[in-house]
Image (tube, grey):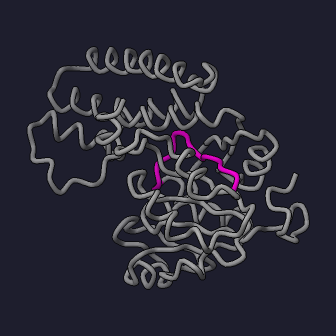
Amino acid sequence: MSPKGTSGRKSGSGWRVAVLGGGAWGTALALAMLRAGHDVRLYARDNETVSAIARGENPRYLPGISIAPGIAATSDMAAALDNADCVLAVTPAQSLRAVLAQAKNHVPAGAPLVLCAKGIERDTGALLSTIVEECLPKNPVAALSGPSFASDVARGLPTAVVVAAREVELAAELAARFSAENLRCYSSGDLIGVEIGGALKNVFAIAAGAVTGAGLGASAQAAMVTRGFVELRRIGAAFGARAETLMGLSGLGDLLLSCSSAQSRNFAYGLALGQGKPLAGLPLAEGVPTAGIA
């Protein structure tokens, strides 16, 4: 099926993909979409990031990683979204509603909105897909999630993720169109399961970092991650997530990666917490607001 009936593009041809977010993950996904053969436009709020990307690097978020020509960066959201066949929302979970309100009048009707952030809205307890359905009722929603660090994806290192949507056909088409050399996208019809896995692993990554930071040892670390996964499955089941989804890339896979490396902002936050270091000024850790809800 074609997720956007008005696109006019032939099957198999490249899409015009709008990426909302000029941070590390947004830049990495823009590069991934470029490698997959798409026409990529990236929206960033500040002109400094836009200019830096045009020069071939995003030193603030992905220092030392070359950005290939072909990504059209702009601070004009309307220009980024103009005639888009697909939109990747790569903004922090707590900012999603505000960003969608700004984008609402510019997103083409029918263009899939793919969530690329992980979290639960602090003020309402809503999953991110619920926010999209409230703000953009004419656009099908999907989510891209899995064990993937921005620097790895930006460098083109082998990575596997899941693209989920309630419509299995849409998920399959998005996964096929996003896949490229060294980026394998699997499809799933369990949107809720993929969202829950991504949101909750952030919380457990903070706990894993705290265990490591406090010097409690590898045994305690293994116990925490294992019991964390048990809780993830219980909460996921309460939301209606499928067990096999939580056992896959977007659940267990993402949990293992995030609980084992300081590249994870949530693990790094927990590490500082366990070491008794100041937390002010640390990079955004989505697991913090989610922990207060979960």
**Quarter-of-image position of residue 291:** top left
Tell me the quarter of the image containing the C terminus.
Answer: top left
| Residue 265 part of the magenta segment | no
In-image side of 260 versus 189 (left or right):
left
- Is residue 86 positioned above or below 150 on the image? below
- How many labels sit on residues? 0
Q: 68 or 245: nearer the eye?
A: 245
Q: Position of residue 153 (x, y in %)?
A: 54, 54
Q: Position of residue 142 (x, y in %)?
A: 65, 47
Task: Identify which residue is drawn at 16% across, 37% down.
Answer: 273
The answer to whether residue 141 is magenta is: yes
| Relative image position of residue 210 (x, y in whole percent) | 21, 31
Up the image or down, 56 lies above or below 203; here it is: below
Q: Which residues are magenta?
A: 139-151
Q: Residue at x 26, y 33 (%)?
A: 209
Q: Residue furthest right?
A: 10
Query: Which of the pair 121/203 is nearer the observer?
Result: 121
Q: Is residue 116 left or right of residue 49?
A: right
Whether 16 is drawn above or below 197: the answer is below
Residue at the image position 55 percent from the left and 73 percent from the top: 42
Splitting the image into 4 quarters, where does residue 216 fall? top left
Residue 56 rendering spot, x and y as whole percentages: 49, 79
Q: With respect to residue 133, does 64 lie above or below? A: below
Residue appearing at x 15%, y 33% in the figure: 274
Q: Is residue 119 shown left or right of residue 146?
A: left
